[in-house]
Amino acid sequence: MKLLHSSSPTTCAARPRTSLRWRWLLAGAVIIAALLLSACGGGKEETAGNGSPAKNVPGVTDTEIKLGTHFALSQTPAAAYAPIIFGMRAYFDYINDQGGVNGRKITFIIGDDHYNPPDSVEVVRKLVEQDNVFAIVGGLGEACHSAVYKYLEDRGVPDLFITAGLLKWSEPVAKTRFAGSVDFVTEGRMLGKYVVENYPGKKLGLLLQNDEMGSDSEKGLNMALEGSDIQIVAKEHYEAINFDATAQTQRLRNAGAEVIMAFAIPPQAASLVKTARETLSWDVPILVSGIDVSEIFIDLAGAVNAEGIVSIVMGHQIYETDQPGIQKHIEIMQKYGGGTAPSNFTLYGNAMGELTVEGLKRAGRDLTRESLVDAIESIRGWYCSGCVVPVSFSPTDHRPLEIEMYNRVEDGKWVAFGDLVSFESTPE
Amino acid sequence: MVRVLLRPRTFVMAAGLAVLIAFPYLYRLPFFDNYLSDFRTFQATRFAIWIIVLMGLNLLTGYSGQISLGHAAFVAVGAYIAAILMKDAGLPVFAAVLAAALLTGLLGFLIGAPALRLSGPYLAIATLALIIVLPQILKHPSIDQWTGGVSGIRISSPRVPASMHNNLDMNTDQWLYYNCMLAALIMTAMAWSVTRSRLGRAFIALRDSEIGAQQMGINVSLYKMTAFGLSSLYAGAGGALYLYQQYYVGPTSFDITFSLTLLIMIVLGGLASISGAVFAALIFTVKDDLTNFIVAHIPFGEKIGIESSRGALFGLLLIVSIIFTPRGIAGNLRKQKEARPGGPRKSRIAALVNKIGLFSRKEAQASSD
C-alpha cells in the first residue's frame, strides 16, 4: 500500500524529465551516427596516405624514429633515478639538432610508471600499441621491467639497454632484448674476485637487498668464492623501502665479519658505512655495489666515513672535467638538459643514449626492427664518450658491459685504481 | 511488464550493455581506430578489475564504516592463491579465481577477528601493518618454492578458446575483457543486493552507531567479521583476475601507495554507493592518462620541471576535487537528485524486484524507501 502511494506522485513529476532524457538520447544517437558516417568517408584515405611508403615499420617514418621508455619520475623514492633518463633525452635532443640519425629525428616518449609494476605494464602497452614506438630504451627497475619483458619479447619490440641489472635479461638470450648496466651476477663475481685476491682467509659479512638484486649478486659472489678460503659468516637482508641499515650492521659485527660486502643501493649502503664508522668505530674493509659509485653515496655516508670504500664502475666520473667526453656531456646537459644538473646518473643515461644512436646508425637508412638487432649485435670494442671499458655484443652475448674497473674513495671522490676486470664473453 | 520495458532507464541500461559488449571490437571500425586499440581494451579490463576491488572496499569502508589501509594485501593474497592454484595445482581459471576469492574471503574473516577489537585509527594502523609485512612473508625462504620468492610467479598467458577465436576472431585482450567484465557485473549485482538486504542494513547500522546496532540485536563482532570477510572476498577475486590479466604477480606488485590510493579513490568516487565504486574505478583507471594530458598541455612545462612534479599535480587535483565534491562523485549526484523539485525519484528496479519477489516483502519495501 505504502509503495503505491509514494510512487504515484513521483511518476507524475518524472514525466517532463523523461521526455528531456529521450531528447538527450536521441541527440546522442544522432551524433554517434554522424561521427560514424564521417569516419567511413574519411578513414580509409587517411590510413592509405599515412606512414612510410615502402614498408610498414612501427614508429619509423621518413623523418622520425619514435622511441619510448618506462621510468619512475614521481610518487616514489626511485624518482631519484630520473636524471638517468633526462640525460638520455638530452643526448637525443642534441643528436636531433645535429640532423638526427640517417636523416631521421628521434622522438622520445617517457612514460611515468611510479616504480610500480602494474603501471609499467600499462605504460609499456600504451607506448607499443597506442603510440606505436619503434623500440623501448632503458626501462627502469628490476620488478618493473620483470612485468613487461616477456610482453616485449613476444611482440618482437626491441627492448634495449635495460636500467636494471638482472641476469635474466640476457640469459637465455632473447633476439630483441639487450641488457644495459652490468648484471648483478657479473658484478658479484667481480667484487668477489677482489675479496679473494685481497682478503684471503677472512670472514665475510653480506648486506643484501631482499629482492632479485640481492639474490643475483649473491649468486655471482658464490661463483667467485668457490674453491677459495673465504667464509661467509653472516647474511643480512633489508627491504628497499626501508632506508636504515643500522641493525643489520650491528648484527654483521656481532657475527665477527672481517670484510663487508654491501650489495645495496645508496641509502642503505651509506647507512651501513656511517653506522660502522661513526656508531661502532669499526674500521672494517667495505665493498659496495656499482650503483653506489655516485656523489649521492658519498654525501649520505660522509666523505670521511666513505674513505677507502671499494667498488666497480664502467667509466669516468662527472667531476673528471679534464676528460673530453665529460666536458662534452656537461655542455649537452647545459643546452638540452632542461634544468637537470649533470651527474653520474645523467652520464650513464648519456652513454646508453650514445649506444642506442650507434645501433640506429649502423642499421642504416633501411631501418627495421630486425636490422636494428643485427646492427647492435655487430658492435664490438666500442667506447662511449665517457667510458673506460669497451662495449661488445654478439648474437650469443647481449650484455654490453662485462669489463669494469675498480674504484676507491679517496679524499671524498671515487678514483680508479688497478687493472680492468673482465668477464667478457664475446670473442675478440 | 511492457511499461517497464519501455521505460527510458531500461533503454539506457540496454544501451550501456550494448556498449560494454561492443567495446572491444569498436577499434576495428573506422573512426574508432584513431582512439581505441587493444590497449584500451586492456585498460577497460583493468577498469572491470578495479570495480570489483573497490566495490569490496566500499562495502567495508563505505557501508560498515571500518577503515582499511591495507586492503591491497588481500588483493595480493588473491593473486598469489590463484597463481599457485593455476601453476602448481593446474586448476582451470574459473575454479582458481573462485577458490582464490573464497579463500581470501575466509582469511579476511579470520583476520577480522582480532582486528574487530580495534576501531577507528587503531584498526587503520593494524591493517596498514598487513600491507607492510606481506611482501616479506611472500619472500620468506620457507615458502618461496610456492611464492617464487623475490621473482614472483609467472603463469602461462591465457588461451582464447578455439571456437571464440575462429568464429569471432577474438584475441587475448578481448577474451580477458569479457571474462573480467562479466565478473564485474556479477559482483556488482551481488554488492547491490547485499547492500539492500538485512546484511547491508546491519552494516549501515554498525557504521552509524555501534551501540544502537547492538540494541537492535545485531551481533556486532559477527557482522564486523562478515564485512571484513566479504570485502576480502571481493579483493581476492579482483586479485585473481588481475593475475589472470597480467599473468604475473610479484612481491612488489602491490605496495603501500597502491593500498592508500584505493582508499583515496573510493572517497573520491563516493562512499556507501554502488555507483561510487564504479566512478572510483574509472578515476583509478584514467588518473595517469589525465595527469599526462595535463602535463603535456602546460606551456613551458619542461622548463619548470613539471615532469617530476606529477605527484604534486595529482595531489592538487585530489584537493580540488575534495573541495568541490566532498561526498564523492556519486554522493554529489545523489545530492543534486535530492535537491530536484518533487524529491528523489524512487528506484524502479526496487519496485520491480518487489513485484518479482526476489526478497522478502519487508526487505524489498525497505529498499524502495
Image (tube, coloured by chain):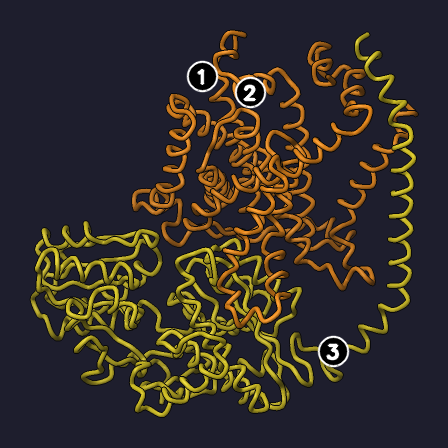
Chain colours: A yellow, B orange
Residue in the image at 13% along x and 59% along y? A276
Nearer the camera: disc 1 or disc 3: 1
Residue in the image at 63% along x and 61% along y? B293
Which SS class for mark 2? helix
Real-space CA distance between mark 1 and mark 2, rounded to the nearest whole angstrom: 11 Å
Q: In the drawing, what numbered circle is on residue B203? A: 2
User: Which chain does the numbered disc 1 sit on?
Assistant: B
Q: Is residue B197 above or below residue A413?
A: above
Q: Residues within 10 Å of mark 2 (few under 14, many from 20)?
A: many
Whether the residues at callouts 1 and 3 have beta carbons within 8 Å, the answer is: no
Whether the residues at callouts 3 and 2 have beta carbons within 8 Å, the answer is: no
User: Which chain does the numbered disc 2 sit on?
Assistant: B
Kind of residue sitting beneath label 3: Gly
**Which residue matches tag 1?**
B221
Check if mark 1 and mark 2 are on a common chain. Answer: yes
Residue in the image at 8% along x and 59% along y? A281
Residue B217 image offset from top left, x and y in percent: 52, 7
Which SS class for mark 1? helix
Please report whichever mark, 1 or 2, sits nearer to the chain's N-terminal start: 2
Kind of residue sitting beneath label 2: Phe
Q: Nearer the viewer, residue B325 or A394?
A: B325
Real-space CA distance between mark 1 and mark 3, rounded to the nearest whole angstrom: 64 Å
